[in-house]
Image: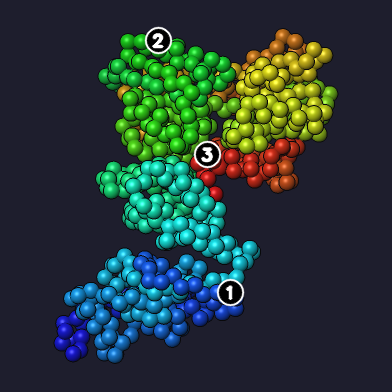
């Protein structure tokens, strides 16, 4: 019986039209339009063994080719049929479709697996019909072709890493961009094993959670992002945990907001996100009904008795006293920043209207909260974030560092200087480079030794030992300490510029953070309902802001010691006034990095986006950790690790 007699002519013609359209489109793009064949792909490749995987369920998207080239020309790249409707091929294809429609195809296909892709030996028409019908998977008798290991091939290294995951999951349609990501996913599942009901948590994550995520990720525009679906899933799971995808509405909304966040991270145009560098004002807007009884949370990494948290706590007390009839502030001390302890942050966000997380270390947990709590006002104290639903606030501390670099050069006859930081955040890198430029403005042969934690897990005593050992390697008598190191081993009393005297290290200048200026402005704006969660205080803007305030706002200042000479005091005043008046710029060219590459052209000043995305070290700097490690720290804290690691 012909396809015309069966009334299935339109089905084959529809499938063939898809195939012909695909061939035409790919040819216009100068891409091969037919099925890839394994014979051609493995030509010249040394296959060291063949391993039978038995009959397994294979996702149809993994079936990307056929065994021989002769068979491949009968189908388009997506397995749609191409031959004439009157051909024997068309008749057989339609018979297969009829069986699928009436009773369902059951006989497994035969195929080879090579580099995580499936190539059909027997059953091409079954695959074609199933793909046309939109089926997800189908049984296949699969033989794995094992290529010889080749460390010079990224694809080969990824494939061998994927086999480790396959051994655990018994299924693997996940393909990462880097081999080490399989290990990260395995570790993540290991940490969450107790939360799974499934007998095999690896199979559950790979088959159920990943496939559900992939479906939504592609539906909401993930295909347009410069990141693989697997990479996006790993980062999503790192931040969000292995959330049960059966809660479909909640899960869909979370993934949708996550994709929007990824799009903002991937954006090349930082300027599309407004950065407020001066205190907000009403700008002539009409007064609005004021809000009352707001619960405002301040999240601290430590007990707020000293150091960084102490400045924020002082500002918190001020706004509580000023707005005592309208807000209730609550302090949350020793809050973990570990993803595994997210429930602690989740409860804080759930119980409050406004949340100020006072340290950049909370970026992952605050991002996770922003995906779930759309009606909350979330603020992260960080120099910048591309996360769409998370407002950030910080100070342009590189302005202070530039001036203190000039002070350091004016008080020392040495050519070596030290710069200490406990964490290599983006703000620390900006300050390091600005400090060095301030030094070399006066001493063109000045060199700076960066001393930082050699790992994110290094404890306080180990870090203090690192400081002592690294300082012994230098011939410096001036050190800029940007960390709140403590303990008996620490020779510094806090943040500031220190000069070695006969009696020891003496503080000669201190960067001042007046957080009262920022919190007062924010609370006033929130109470006036000029903006809500995820919305700008600017009347015609809806995107989130980065509040990045400098010396001109009064939030930042510099306190200098009376022991400094009058000439040095005049230098500080001159540079400070110049920066406030925007006639002096810390990052004004020519500026070269440590490799000699010109980063800022002569007579040009760095744009906001140049400073925000700074990932290079200026000429004249050496460090106690590798450049790659420094770069990875910056990527982690500004959010771009999802696109690079």
* Residue neighbourhood size for the residue with mark 3, other residues' Cα within 10 Å, grouped as few (<14), some (14–19), many (≥20): many
Foreground label between 2 and 1: 1
Q: Residue 527 at what x, y percent from top left?
A: 33, 19
Q: Is residue 113 above or below residue 325?
A: below
Comes first in the chain, label 2 or label 1:
1
Read off the residue under disc 2: 322
Q: Position of residue 465 (x, y in %)?
A: 71, 27
Q: Residue at x 71, y 33 (%)?
A: 450
Give the residue pinned by disc 3. Answer: 638
Label 3 and label 1: CA atoms lie apart by: 44 Å
Pointer 3 or 1: first along the chain: 1
Is residue 610 in sight in this rendering?
no
At x 33% / y 28%, what residue is drawn?
A: 350
Q: Residue furthest front?
A: 199
Q: Give the SS element for disc 1.
A: strand
Question: Residue 97 occupies which quadrant of the picture?
Answer: bottom left
Sequence-wise first label, 3 or 2: 2
Circle on res. 48: 1
Residue drawn 34% across and 37% down?
Answer: 372
């Amino acid at each position: 019986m012909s396809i015309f007699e069966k009334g299935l002519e339109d089905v084959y013609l529809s499938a063939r039209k898809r195939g012909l359209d695909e061939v035409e489109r790919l040819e216009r793009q100068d891409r091969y339009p037919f099925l890839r064949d394994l014979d051609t792909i493995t030509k010249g490749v040394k296959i060291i063994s063949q391993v039978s995987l038995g009959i397994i369920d294979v996702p149809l998207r993994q079936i990307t080719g056929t065994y021989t080239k002769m068979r491949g020309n009968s189908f388009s790249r997506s397995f749609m049929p191409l031959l004439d409707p009157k051909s024997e091929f068309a008749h057989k294809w339609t018979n297969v479709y009829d069986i699928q429609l009436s009773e369902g195809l059951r006989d497994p296909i035969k195929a080879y697996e090579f580099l995580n892709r499936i190539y059909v030996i027997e059953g091409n028409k079954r695959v074609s019909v199933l793909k046309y019908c939109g089926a997800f998977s189908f049984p296949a008798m699969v033989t794995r072709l094992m290529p010889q290991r080749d460390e010079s091939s990224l694809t080969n290294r990824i494939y061998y890493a994927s086999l480790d995951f396959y051994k655990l999951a018994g299924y693997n349609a996940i393909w990462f961009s880097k081999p080490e990501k399989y290990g990260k996913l395995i570790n993540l599942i290991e940490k969450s094993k107790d939360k799974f009901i499934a007998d095999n948590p690896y199979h559950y994550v790979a088959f159920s959670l990943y496939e559900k995520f992939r479906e939504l990720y592609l539906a909401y525009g993930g295909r347009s992002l410069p990141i693989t679906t697997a990479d996006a899933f790993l980062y999503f799971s790192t931040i969000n945990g292995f959330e049960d995808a059966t809660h479909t509405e909640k899960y869909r909304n979370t993934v949708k907001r996550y994709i929007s966040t990824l799009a903002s991270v991937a954006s090349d145009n930082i300027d599309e996100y407004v950065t407020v560098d001066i205190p907000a004002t009403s700008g002539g807007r009409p007064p609005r009904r004021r809000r009352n009884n707001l619960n405002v949370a301040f999240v601290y990494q430590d007990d707020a008795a000293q150091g960084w948290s102490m400045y924020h706590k002082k500002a918190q007390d001020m706004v509580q006293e000023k707005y005592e009839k309208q807000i209730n502030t609550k302090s949350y001390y020793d809050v973990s920043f570990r993803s595994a302890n997210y429930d602690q942050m989740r409860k804080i966000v759930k119980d409050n209207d406004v949340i100020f997380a006072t340290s950049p270390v909370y970026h992952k947990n605050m991002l996770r909260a922003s995906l779930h709590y759309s009606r909350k006002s979330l603020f992260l104290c960080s120099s910048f974030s591309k996360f769409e639903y998370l407002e950030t606030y910080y100070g342009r501390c590189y302005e202070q560092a530039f001036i203190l670099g000039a002070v350091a050069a004016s008080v020392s006859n040495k050519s070596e200087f030290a710069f200490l930081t406990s964490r290599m955040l983006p703000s620390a890198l900006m300050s390091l480079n600005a400090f060095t430029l301030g030094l070399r403005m006066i001493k063109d042969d000045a060199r700076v030794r960066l001393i930082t934690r050699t790992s994110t897990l290094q404890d306080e005593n180990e870090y203090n030992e690192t400081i002592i050992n690294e300082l012994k390697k230098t011939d410096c008598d001036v050190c800029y300490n940007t960390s709140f190191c403590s303990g008996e081993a620490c020779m510094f009393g806090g943040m500031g510029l220190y000069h070695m005297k006969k009696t020891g290290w003496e503080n000669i200048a201190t960067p001042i953070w007046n957080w009262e200026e920022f919190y007062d402005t924010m609370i006033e704006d929130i109470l006036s309902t000029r903006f809500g969660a995820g919305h700008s205080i600017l009347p015609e803007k809806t995107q989130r802001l980065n509040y990045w305030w400098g010396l001109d706002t009064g939030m930042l200042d510099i306190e200098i010691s009376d022991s400094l000479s009058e000439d040095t005091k005049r230098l500080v005043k001159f540079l400070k006034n110049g920066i406030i008046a925007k006639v002096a710029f810390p990052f004004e060219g020519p500026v070269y990095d440590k490799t000699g590459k010109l980063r800022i052209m002569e007579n040009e000043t760095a744009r906001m986006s140049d400073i925000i995305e700074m990932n290079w070290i200026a000429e004249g700097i050496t460090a106690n950790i590798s450049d790659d490690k420094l770069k990875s720290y910056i990527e982690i804290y500004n959010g771009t690790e999802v696109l690079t690691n």
